[in-house]
Image (cartoon, rainbow, N blue to C red):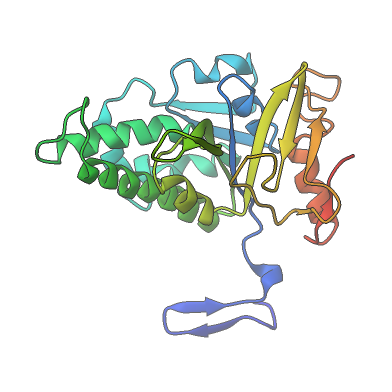
């Protein structure tokens, strides 16, 4: 026990240096931009909880990624996440040496959640979901995220949620901004629980990462980067590059730099 650790009934109080050092991230962007591949640039062995059909197909034969494939499950699968340890995931974290859990994608899970909401909401249909069904979707999806966040925090394991991109419009159909494809207030509510919210895009065969809101994209935030001078960078990460599976601009590199810097903010790459 460190000199700064105290115990009161039911709660342990310790110094920030002794607290969980894991990173939580929400990585969002258009379909096919490489979110799953980039999420898997996190260090060590990853457990990929997959809800997207063919989601892991872009990973090749990587041995540092274990896939828990739930993409063929019906909406009843959401009931399994009404638990502090869904599917008893904790039992594989240690034996498999898992250092990061990836949920791919939260958008696909939210679709299962709205289907579940429809099934338990009187009068709701797939063609015309009611406000009650959408409310259930939000609660069910947030419950899953909270469960995974608590589990990974307890075991000091990184966690990354991937989410697709959507266009937000006003009631007249006018464009407002690009945002998370989660619907209603769910995107903002989900982002509140996460430390790192990054946007990944691609143009002219270059991937770009944005870590603060800008150019009609929101929400993003970061505790890792100092954004006083720059909020985005061209991402040089290559899955099959010479330094694979990590290398330049990988999440493993950024996490290592952040830890080496005493968990003080690091510079956004130029």
Say whether residue 263 is left or right of residue 201.
right
Residue 140 visible in the current orientation: yes
Q: Is residue 258 above or below residue 162?
A: below
Q: Residue furthest right?
A: 270
Comparing 2 with 242, the one in front is 242
Q: Quadrant of residue 270?
A: top right
Q: Residue at x 48, y 50 (%)?
A: 188
Q: Position of residue 268 (x, y in %)?
A: 83, 46
Q: Residue at x 58, y 25 (%)?
A: 30
Residue 151 visible in the current orientation: no
Q: Quadrant of residue 72?
A: top left
Q: Position of residue 149 (x, y in %)?
A: 49, 52
Image quadrant containing the N terminus: bottom right
Say whether residue 41 is left or right of residue 14.
right
Say whether residue 206 is left or right of residue 66.
right
Q: Is residue 242 above or below residue 108?
A: above
Q: Is residue 33 above or below residue 16?
A: above
Comparing 163 with 165, the one in front is 165
Q: Residue at x 15, y 35 (%)?
A: 124
């Amino acid at each position: 026990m460190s000199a700064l650790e105290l115990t009161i009934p039911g709660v342990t109080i310790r110094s920030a240096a002794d607290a969980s050092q894991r990173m939580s991230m929400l990585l969002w962007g258009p379909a096919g931009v490489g979110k799953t591949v980039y999420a898997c640039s996190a260090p060590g062995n990853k457990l990929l909880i997959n809800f997207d059909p063919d989601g892991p197909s872009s990973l090749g034969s990587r041995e540092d990624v274990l896939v828990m494939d739930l993409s063929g499950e019906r909406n009843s699968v959401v009931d399994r996440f009404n638990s502090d340890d869904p599917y008893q995931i904790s039992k594989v974290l240690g034996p498999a040496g898992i250092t990061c859990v990836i949920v791919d994608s939260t958008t696909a899970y939210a679709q299962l959640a709205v289907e579940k909401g429809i099934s338990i909401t009187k009068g709701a249909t797939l063609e015309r979901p009611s406000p009650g069904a959408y409310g259930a979707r939000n609660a069910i999806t947030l419950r899953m995220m909270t469960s995974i966040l608590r589990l990974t925090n307890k075991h000091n394991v990184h966690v990354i949620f991937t989410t697709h991109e959507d266009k937000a419009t006003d009631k007249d159909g006018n464009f407002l901004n690009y945002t998370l494809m989660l619907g209603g207030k769910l995107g903002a509510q989900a982002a509140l629980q996460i430390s790192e919210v990054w946007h990944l895009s691609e143009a002219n065969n270059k991937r770009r990462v944005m870590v603060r809101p800008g150019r009609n994209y929101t929400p993003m935030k970061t505790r890792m980067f100092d954004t006083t001078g720059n909020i985005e960078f061209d991402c040089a990460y290559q899955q099959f590059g010479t330094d694979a599976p990590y290398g330049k601009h990988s999440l493993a590199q950024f996490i290592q730099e952040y830890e080496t810097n005493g968990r003080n903010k690091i510079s956004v790459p130029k």
